Image (tube, rainbow, N blue to C red):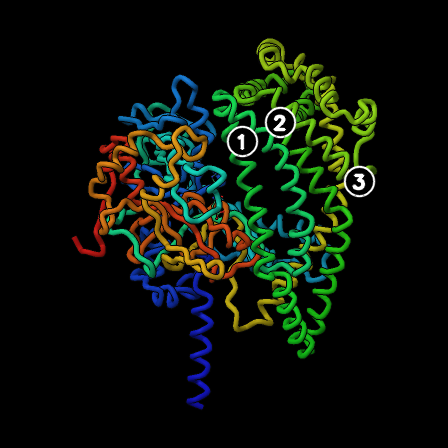
Amino acid sequence: MKKGMLLFLLVALTALRVQAGDGMWLPLLLKQLNEAEMKGLGMKMSAEDIYSVNKNSLKDAIVSFGGGCTGEVISGKGLVLTNHHCGESRIQSHSTLSKNYYADGFWAKSLAEELPNQGLFVTFIVRMEDVTKTVLENVEEEMPENLRQGNIERNIALLRNSAQRETWQEISVRPFFGGNQYFLFVTETYRDVRFVGAPPASIGSFGKDTDNWVWPRHTGDFSLFRIYADRNNRPAEYSPDNVPFQPRHFLPISLDGVEEGDFTLVFGFPGATNAYLPAVALQQTIEIVNPARIAVRDRTLGVYDKAMRADRQIRLQYVSKQARLANAWKKWMGEMQGLEAAGAVAKKREYEAEFQRRVMAHPEWKWRYGNVLAELEARYKDLAVYLQSNEYATEIGSRNIELFQLSNTLSGYVNVLENNGVEALKGRSDNLLKYLEGFYKDYRPEIDRQVFAELMALYMSKVQADLMPGIAIEQATEYGKDYNLWAAELYTGSMLNRGDLALQMVRVKPEDFISAVQKDPAYQLARAIVEVNAEKLAKPVGRIQQEINRLQRLYMEAQMTVFTEKRFFPDANSTLRVSYGQVSGSEPRDGIRYQPVTYLDGVMEKYKPGDYEFDVPAKLVQLYKNRDFGPYAAANGKMPVNFTGSNHTTGGNSGSPAIDAHGNLIGLNFDRQWEGTMSDLFYDPAICRNIMVDIRYVLFLVDKLGGAKHLIEEMKLVHPKSGK
Ligand code: ARG
Ligand code: GLU
């Protein structure tokens, strides 16, 4: 009996050790599921200090930044820290060649100099609540999916109307574990968020695409914004009368630095993971999905690269678009390689075999879950028929050719004119004008034309002919597959390539502009492709996907029922999560040991004067030569730059704070290392590492490089290790 107990404890402990690092956990369940393990890893706080509805806690300092990133409040005056790449499109849009904040950096010297950003918002989580029972009321096991979904939506609508909230707060309800659980969120969204500062892009995105997703890394990937509120500290639209927001909590900043083995916690809004898919789904990712997307972006990025290297103006106009396309493009490559290196498909197959063994040995499970894997397999096989065409057609039709993207947006206005008439269109002409001004500011027809030529060649060869619109086939034939000629004539003939004319028409008579758009040859081609994609691809794929979702929900429930020894975290879904682990290097391949910390010395090793990716400002070189690091150097006298940890993160965790055992800020999450980029689908604790900027590098750049000491003075600097 005693022996048995001991054995059980041993097994449980090793299981825990292996699991450390794996998971993005719900803040309100930490006490139950994670607190003990976190303390074992060195945490000195309680779960209540991290998330509480009764008192101020760390969560009150965390915001979803602009919908796709995370930020954290670091002063009593609403100062927000996030990544440079999260603020990039804003920084770029405030920049021109003569006043280039993007290239030269920007530091507002006073509140008056902080720059407003139309459309930018940050969202706080006030509280969250398990509402599974209410949402699944009247939802029967055997209901068809659309009926089930209808009932769920009705229950959610009722909940949203009845849940307690203040007038300025919002309510949302989101599915977890594939729809087995639901949580309600009460949130507060602030819409006056101003740009405060950023280092030059050569520091903020040092290493660009070459270093992206790669360790060792040397990037100062941060920028600063400030939240403004009305006189009552409540959310308000932009107004010059707004005042700096006073947070319930802001993160103190530790100057004591990190060492391997230190506890770390990453708090933020991870976007999407798929940790519980069947092997067949991973196989399709490796064989079909990622290769298709990569092939399309290879071509787009090839065109951009040449143009951007040749022309400064183009570089500024395309930098943000390029970074967005390149970021996922490179991740998909790493993900494929990582899945293959880890033998992920084979390991999932083993897991499935074990699952099936357990299910078949248990009569009730056998009845309920016995076929779920076989059915999933069959539905993924159905999907495979469309998959290649679908990936190429959506990537080309909606995400790479700017003229197509413009057409997709304009089609909304065409609908307004057709369905609601001229007055309705006029009512929206301000929005239309703003959108077009933004679009044309950074649009170069001669670049998009080359992208079009490259991608239509790919489209014609990779998409099944019966899944294309006739007009595309006719035009391709007419030009004898001379894609450059096709592109040249289409782009010269399209009024959409004449931004000045378009803007002028919208200002004078928006209805004339929209009528002309409807007759435009480029618009018509774009619409034909998008409509055929919707009808012949999205529809059947959607039908199959709905079946897959139903089966995946059952498979999720089954895994949680059958593997009682495993602890499950819900896949990321852009809701607030806690990941935790330790500062940690890794041994990604035989004979290679990655140190967990990099220094400014490494920046200087990579430094290539005049290079598009590896140049740095002369002032940084000077500070380095003079060892002028202020109070921010590490104990060894060097300037720390980045560090890695065993925290499970994904896209959306950009800008998330890295927090120490006591609740102080020690770093800023911004990336993962190459060998572990498959972690969205298959997490391996031995080689999956997140990459963070050392907070001391941030402070050094603000103070010594930017000369913005007034910002440092707003912050609360602490010494938790030395107790000073
Ligand atoms: N890979 C990081 C992320 O997923 C950083 C991206 C920004 N840097 C870049 N070179 N695009 O967002
Ligand atoms: N850079 C990513 C982002 O934009 C975060 C890093 C990751 O994907 O792990 O969200």
Q: How crowded is mark 1: few (under 14 residues within 10 Å), some or many (20 or more)?
A: some
- Label 1, label 2: how far apart the Cα atoms are: 10 Å
Question: Does 633 appear above or below 549?
Answer: above
Q: Name the residue under label 3.
A: 464
Question: Does 255 appear above or below 304?
Answer: below
Check disc 1 and give the amino acid type.
Lys
Q: Name the residue under label 1.
A: 321
- Label 3, label 2: how far apart the Cα atoms are: 23 Å
Residue 402 numbered mark, or none: 2
Query: Left or right of 71: which side holds 130?
Result: right
Mark 3, secondary structure of its residue: loop
Residues 550 and 146: in front is 550
Mark 2, secondary structure of its residue: helix
Q: Do the numbered discs 1 and 2 sit on residues whose CB atoms are within 8 Å?
A: yes
Question: Does 637 appear above or below 6?
Answer: above
Residues 371 and 42: in front is 42
Query: Left or right of 125: which side holds 384?
Result: right
Q: State the image coordinates of residue 128 (x, y, percent, origin top left).
A: 45, 52
The answer to whether one can see residue 184 in this image is: yes
